[in-house]
Amino acid sequence: MDQQQLRDLEAKCVQELSPQCKAGCPLHVDARSLCASLATGDFDAAWQVLLKTLPLPGVLARICDGPCRQQCLRGKAGDPVQIHLLERSVVQRPRPRQRSLAMPARDKAVAVAGSGLSGLVLASDLKRKGYTVTLFEPGPRLGHPLYGRFGELLPDAAIDEEMSALEDAGVVVHTGAEVSDGAFMDGALASFDALYLCLDAGLEVAWPLRMEQGAPVYDEMLGTTSLSRVLAGGDSASPVERAAQGRRAANTIDRLLQGVSLSAERSDQGAYRSRLYTSLAKVPSLPAVVPADPIEGFSPQQAAYEAERCLQCECLECVKACAYLAHYKGYPKTYARQIYNNLAIVKGHRQANQLINSCMLCGQCSALCPHDFPMAELCLETRQSMVAEGIMPPSAFDFALEDLRFSSSSEFFLFRHAPGRDASTYLLFPGCQLCASSPGHVEVLYQWLRENVSQATGLGLGCCGVPAHWAGERGCFERELDRVRQEWERLGKPTIITACATCLSTFQEYAPDVAVAGLWNIMTGYLSPGDASPRGAKKPVAVHDPCAARHNPVLRHSARRLLSHTGVKVRELELAHEQTSCCGYGGLMYSSNPALAKKVAEKRVSESKADFVAYCAMCRDNLAATGKRVYHLLDLLFPEAAKSHLPPGNSKSNNSAQEDPAARPAPGFSQRQENKADLRRRLLKTLWQEEPPPMQAHQHLDLVMEPGLQELLEERRILLNDLRRVILHAERTGQKLADAKTGRFLAYHQPVRVTYWVEYAPEGESFRVYNAYSHRMTIPGGPA
Amino acid sequence: MSLLSFTPDTDWTCGKCGGKLTPSPVDVEYLGNVFNVELLGCAKCGLVLIPEDLALGKMFEVEQLLEDK
Ligand code: SF4
Ligand code: SF4
Ligand code: SF4
Ligand SMILES: [Zn+2]
């Protein structure tokens, strides 16, 4: 990623842009902050907001006509926030002490003819910038054009206060000045560096400027006239616009006197429409608060009520939905910069590794973002370059990649024509996760497809390789995908039917030559209403779409159709279909950031009290692991299957699965691997009448342990087979530590990258495990 | 790297030769970085002891640091 790509990315996220009120204010008063302060009754803080941007606040806040209101978003849900009245209520309270931020004096002098609003604002701005400012007012006192002009809204005392402040700041004032003839102009240009003509001071001038209909012609944005050092402005009908004209002319004079471009980067001056997006989806309409007395304005209480109507406009559409984005306390624009900086680091701590490796790559943010911010692409591409540069932290994805290796090993990988056939029209590719989660369903499904769709349906057990893709391991991903492709070719290129939305989208995107169909789409062609009637799900269920189905409306629709065939009532989640949330498996978050993955799943299941139904095995298990009742669509389509084709293993969980599939606990990592391996062995035996290959030596070891320890090992990502390998190694070589008092052994072994330690003791034919832990540092010369 | 020492009192003995575990310097390595630490081990058989709190504490910390370096 280069600087330009970063900037393009950053520009897609509008979160930092101004709210409409601020953009719509000719002076860009930060009304959002003003409202935030007033909502809590903090008038001092509100004053500070005004002092930052509003010149002559004691005057302007009383007479501003509030053009910002036309743009205020609250106006789309009730009446716009009456920002002008709020400002008024602020300046009626005592002004807090102001830190004077006068800039160092500059040796340039500016003359101002007339002390209308624009001239006063210009004088105030230029004085603050350190210029010498001299104001020539034909009337008897400074600010003469203001006195009496706004009636009760602007009492003389309020004007007096601001005028004294100007004089205290050092603006030189000549009242009763004669400014109308050309001689004044010539004189001023001789003694001053620039001259401003205040058009809202009621002056009639006969200066040699280009005129139209008796008024000097000037540039609306810059204030420039036909003479280079003479500027003019202030003839707008809106008081705040007049003030803004003065401010813009002050800016032009500043640039003129510094010799820089007068017009560069000034597009956001003056009122404009902001690109900030703010959702009004859950915003109830609220009417304006009416002040009891229009001159007195709001009471503090009323001001707070009115300020509370402000929506505090911001975007954060993606952050509101994605627990991952919320977790790192920023938003995509800030993350893009952090990721860019992370890549740029040559030596030193890379702080954004975890940020990059935790994204679920699910694309929800892009679906919600008004400008499709591509967080998933950003994180994936960054992972790929980290892998290419050899700086990917091994601990992030190792566990998931080991699981992928298992899936493509002879323990699980199997591609066959149907028993007794030598050709296949279809090929059931359940996906590794359905086999791991619920192998019984795979058997039922395979039988159903052969009986109902085609007897020439082969079977493919394996993994599409997506974990390698998510880990940024391009080479490994290609190899895995290619292995599946080769088997598919060997079987005569049958149409792959997959039960996994991720496999489906992976094939479609990365192996477009492979013919593939979603199981749910196929099934809708063969099942009719009433063909399945689940016993369990009498209550309505909330559908959870897998993130891989985000861009597959047909698949989402098919799943719903099948659900309706079962007679179960379906509830839609708020974030459904293309806006669906990931379960926490996507992008391998479960491997790189398990704690956050848990939070993600918890957030998702809290979105509805109803039981969930998922149509991806991984989603089902991740959500069920929170304790939520979650069905797999197959539980409802094949209610008898849960009973007759149960996964082997823990008999307690099997019983509960028979009674109530939604309560079936999510199998742990060890169980998942065993489910996969057992499924392959069982199918070979029952369908192909083949003796499965003998188990490896360590697999025969029988382990016993307390259930609490088993959970701890899951958390530590230590599999039962890891323990078995360590114990077998220790028992074979005698390389182990011993404790004579307890009769226990402590052994270690590094099968691949991680070194595992197991504390155990023989118990009859079995081994009792007391503890296990691991580390990644290697001990050279230790037992291999 | 300074020599760090992890030699707690322990009841573990070498299961191979039955000998006592004694402190000795060992090189541990991660991502190409080698650290010399003092661990308990059997001088004769070469077995070492990395206790749980070392593996999950200091060692884990250093691993994470090195991964982000
Ligand atoms: S609702 Fe508040 S933040 Fe939004 S435009 Fe209106 S005043 Fe500004
Ligand atoms: S997890 Fe999904 S929604 Fe969240 S940032 Fe990553 S791709 Fe976007
Ligand atoms: S949705 Fe997210 S990425 Fe898109 S503009 Fe809003 S905050 Fe930025
Ligand atoms: Zn020994």
Image (spheres, helix red, strand yellow):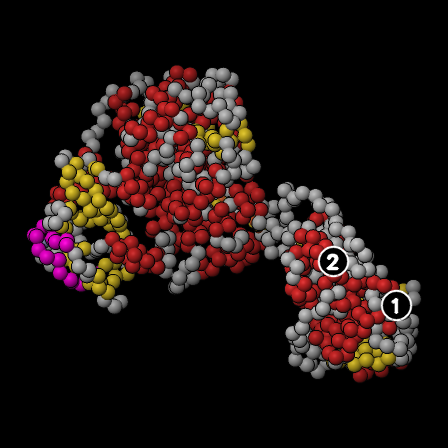
* Rendering coords of residue A29 (x, y %): 70, 61
The residue drawn where x is 30% and y is 17% is A420
Nearest the viewer among A66 and A556 is A66
Rendered view: A779 above or below A705: below
Residue type marked 2: Ser
Residue type marked 1: Gly
Q: Secondary structure at mark 2?
A: loop
Cα separation, mark 1 vs mark 2, equals 25 Å
Which residue position holds label 1? A148
Disc on the earlier residue, 1 or 2: 1
Rendered view: A763 above or below A662: below
The crowding category of the residue bearing disc 1, from other C-alpha atoms within 10 Å (few below 14, some 14 to 19, many at least 20), is: few
Q: Quadrant of residue A140?
A: bottom right
The crowding category of the residue bearing disc 2, from other C-alpha atoms within 10 Å (few below 14, some 14 to 19, many at least 20), is: some
The residue drawn where x is 70% and y is 56% is A301
Q: Secondary structure at mark 1?
A: loop
* Tag 1 near tag 2, CB within 8 Å: no
| Residue A299: image tag | 2
| Residue A496 magenta-highlighted | no
**Magenta highlight range:** B11-27
Q: Chain of mark 1?
A: A
Residue A223 can be seen, yes or no: no
Rendered view: A546 above or below A636: below
* Rendering coords of residue A176 (x, y %): 89, 80
Q: Is residue A79 left or right of residue A733?
A: right
